[in-house]
Amino acid sequence: MKFLIPILTLIPLLSFGFQAKFVHIKGVVKLDGTLIKDKKAPISKPAPIETGKDSLAIVRIGENYTLKINENSIVDLSGILEKTPSVDLKNGSIFSYIKKEIATKQRESFRLKAKDVAMGVRGTTFFASIGKKQDVWMCVKEGVVGVKTKKQNKETLVKAGEGIVARSEGEVSKPKPLPWTKKLNWDNDPESGDLTNTVSIEEAYVDLLDFDYD
């Protein structure tokens, strides 16, 4: 499987140059290979962020886009300064949050890469994960996400409460309501308590295995 590319709409991130910071970290978190010790450290340059076992990082880009990077994950920010800003999920899983008010008013593209799928997001909260077999799983809490792959260029719209799996071969399952998504820890506020996600994604997606593909 090649690369999945979620596309998010929001205000231009580059109006005032690169602006990003850690809002919260837990456990082992590295920026470009350097261990981060300050829970609210600034991010001086767009570089890979890596989390270890039982670790997580919350990153804010500008004022309108937030990432919660779960344990054993790698997210590369190096594409954030491109004409079309992009974030690349190399491994693991990530929650993405975009302010609705901003996203619905602006048409600036933002890409979240994860193998070979493009997810066009409209003011939303969504979750994406790379599985053991290099499938990419995605579900939506708020808003709508349009999913494309290089093999299936037709857009598949995924609504709130629904999810899909994009197989490593390029097929995308039909969207389906997934009650278990409500059990995911969607919280990204460090003041509200434990932010760790305890849902087993591999087990939760068992109900996608018999999905029909377009």
Image (spheres, grey):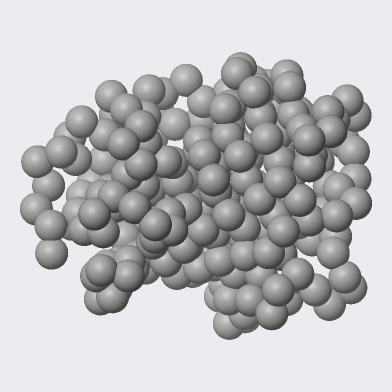
Residue drawn at point x = 58 percent, y = 76 percent: 109
Screen quadrant of the C terminus:
bottom left
Q: Residue at x 25, y 69 (%)?
A: 151
In this rendering, would 162 be left or right of 92?
Answer: left
- Residue 209 coordinates in the image, percent (x, y): 15, 38
Q: Position of residue 140 (x, y in %)?
A: 40, 51
Front one among 190 and 109: 109
Measuring 32% from the left and 27% from the top, which residue is drawn there? 202
Please tell me which residue lies in front, 196 or 128.
128
Give the quarter of the image for residue 52.
top right
Which sits in the foreground, 3 or 6? 3
Tell how many labels.
0
Residue 111 picture location, percent across and down: 56, 66
- Looking at the image, can residue 164 be seen? no
Q: Could you say where residue 198 lies in the image, as x and y percent from the top left?
A: 47, 20
At x 78% / y 42%, what residue is drawn? 32
Is 140 on the left-hand or right-hand side of 67? left
User: Can the viewer see residue 70 in this picture?
Assistant: yes
Above or below residue 76? Residue 101 is below
Residue 62 placement, left or right of 95:
right
Image height of 181 relative to 120, above or below: above
